[in-house]
């Protein structure tokens, strides 16, 4: 069974601070997707990483896929209150499946 | 381009009843999957459909079923509702299996 361990589960920081969220597994994933979810809404896709070692940037957010495609990280620089939400990593076991394996999520609160 | 549309957004049902949830994928997307989200368990995979065929099924009882139509629209059904079925049910679609996956806003089901 493929599992994704996401950490930390909760993060409360001040505006302007940096943070990193980690997603780790003992299994290889064909791709990994990061989502952000607001209360009562569906997850919104932020980025998909496919190649081992890949780094993608989305404004102040930097996403990295591990060389072995077993882990990923999300780094936010100079967090803002608008970054508050639930961040989810989700992996696809192969390119021939639509089944996403989700991490437990990281609840981020950025205080002004 | 319209996103994934789920109807209804909210439902209140009584124990023992059954419920049908609907999902219209993004135009052109052929893969549809369903997830259950609860505070305690996070996002759990229910099933995946592609070309009107169920390709994957999660670890849920037989009371949970689904189907996909020729226009890729999908429905899921839960029979003999239990209190524990209260959750946010999320539908997701992708162009093909293993591609970037986009979620709808979800249907909030409350069983009383």
Image (spheres, grey):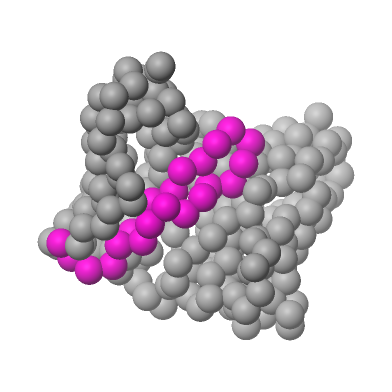
Instruction: Give percent across and percent down for residue B48.
Output: 57, 67
Quadrant in which the N terminus of chain A appears? bottom left
Instruction: Provide residue B21's location: percent of width, then percent of height.
Output: 77, 55
In the rendered view, would you say A88 is above or below B33? above
- Measured along the vertical axis of the image, is residue A42 above or below residue A9? below
Looking at the rendered structure, the number of numbered marks drawn on it comes to 0
Q: State the image quarter where residue A50 is shown.
A: bottom left
Residue appearing at x 51%, y 41% in the figure: A37
What percent of the width, then of the height, locates residue A32?
Answer: 33, 59
> Which range of residues does the magenta coloring cover?
A32-53
In the rendered image, the quadrant that contains the C terminus of chain A is: top left
Q: Within the image, what quadrant is residue B12 found in?
A: top right
Query: Can I make out residue A27 in this image?
Result: no
| Lateral position of residue B105 relative to residue A29, left or right | right
The quarter of the picture where residue A109 lies is: top left
Residue A62 seen from this side:
yes
Verify whether residue B23 appears in magenta. Answer: no
Whether residue A8 is situated above or below residue A48 in the rendered picture: above
Identify the residue at image location x=52%, y=55%: B45
Residue at the image point whose x is 57% and y is 42% from the top: B37
Residue B3 sits above or below residue B31 on the image? above
Q: Which residue: 30% across, 42% down?
A: A60
Relative to the observer, which residue lies in front, B31 or A112?
Answer: A112
Q: Position of residue B84 (x, y in %)?
A: 67, 35
| A95 to the left or right of B79 | left
């Amino acid at each position: 069974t493929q599992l994704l361990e996401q950490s930390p589960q909760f993060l409360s920081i001040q505006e302007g601070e940096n943070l990193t969220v980690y997603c780790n597994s003992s299994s290889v994933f064909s791709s990994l997707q990061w989502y952000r979810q607001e209360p009562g809404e569906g997850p919104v896709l932020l980025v998909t990483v496919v190649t081992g070692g890949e780094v993608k940037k989305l404004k102040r957010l930097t996403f990295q896929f591990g060389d072995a495609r077993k882990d990923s990280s999300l780094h936010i620089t100079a967090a803002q209150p608008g970054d508050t939400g639930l961040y989810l990593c989700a992996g696809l076991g192969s390119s021939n499946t639509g089944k996403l394996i989700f991490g437990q999520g990281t609840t981020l609160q950025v205080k002004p | 381009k319209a996103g994934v549309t789920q109807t209804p957004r909210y439902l209140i049902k009584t124990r023992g009843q059954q419920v049908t949830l609907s999902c219209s994928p993004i135009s052109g997307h052929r893969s549809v999957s369903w997830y259950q989200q609860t505070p305690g368990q996070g996002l759990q995979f229910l099933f995946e459909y592609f070309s009107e065929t169920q390709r994957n099924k999660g670890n849920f009882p037989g009371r949970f079923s689904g189907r996909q139509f020729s226009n890729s629209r999908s429905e899921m059904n839960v029979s003999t509702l239990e209190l524990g079925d209260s959750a946010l049910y999320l539908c997701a679609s992708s162009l093909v299996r293993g591609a970037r996956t986009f979620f709808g806003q979800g249907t909030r089901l409350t069983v009383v």
